[in-house]
Every structure is written in C-alpha cells, then in structure tokens.
Amino acid sequence: MQWILLGTKLVPLIIMAVQAVEKLVKAEKGPAKQDAAVDLVGTWLAALEAGLDRDVLDDADVQAGVRAVIDAYVHLQNVVAKARQK
C-alpha cells in the first residue's frame, strides 16, 4: 500500500518538474530535458527518502516509471498543442 501512495504523490511532482524544466531549459530537447526533470524529482524526493530510509529514485523500476510518466505527460502536451493549432 505504501508504494501506491508514493506513486500517487510522485505524479504531481513529475508534472511540476517537467513544467519547471520546460520553462528553464529552453535550448535543450529530448533526453537532456528528461534527465533534468528526473534530477529535479530526485532533489524533491530527498526528504521523502530520508523518512522511508530508502533511496527510492535509485530503484531502476521507479526511475523507469518516472521516465515513462514524463514521456506520457510531454506527449500529451504536444498532442494538445497540435490540436490547438488546427
């Protein structure tokens, strides 16, 4: 149950990280931006990790999930932007 709660808390953090990177890192695209967003989520998770006594973001499955959510969110942003141009 603890992982479900963590997952629901990660999604808003991931969205905020993507939005922050989109505003601050204009020149870069693709993997560099995704890495910056993952790093930002990792920074925000430091307090949570201390409470859990576990390095959450270093878990390969968690990091893959974070990257998948980033990809999905960015894809949705692109679809919406394209639809607005029509």
Image: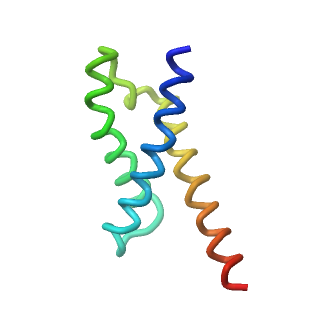
Vertical arrangement, residue 23 with respect to residue 15, above or below: below
Question: In the image, what residue occupies the spot 32% across and 47% down?
Answer: 40
Is 59 left or right of 77, judged from the image as shown? left
Query: What color scheme is it?
Result: rainbow
**53 up-or-down from 82: above or below:** above
Q: Which of the 4 image quadrants contains residue 49? A: top left
Residue 1, position as x, y percentages in the image: 56, 14
5 or 64: nearer the viewer: 5
Total marks shown come to 0
Residue at left offset 64%, top offset 61% = 76
**Quarter-of-image position of residue 23:** bottom left
Horizontal arrangement in the rendering, residue 85 relative to residue 56 (left or right): right
Query: Of 18 and 64, which appears nearest the observer?
Result: 18
Residue reaching furthest bottom?
A: 86
Q: Residue shown at 47%/33% (left/top)?
A: 9
Q: Position of residue 34 (x, y in %)?
A: 43, 54
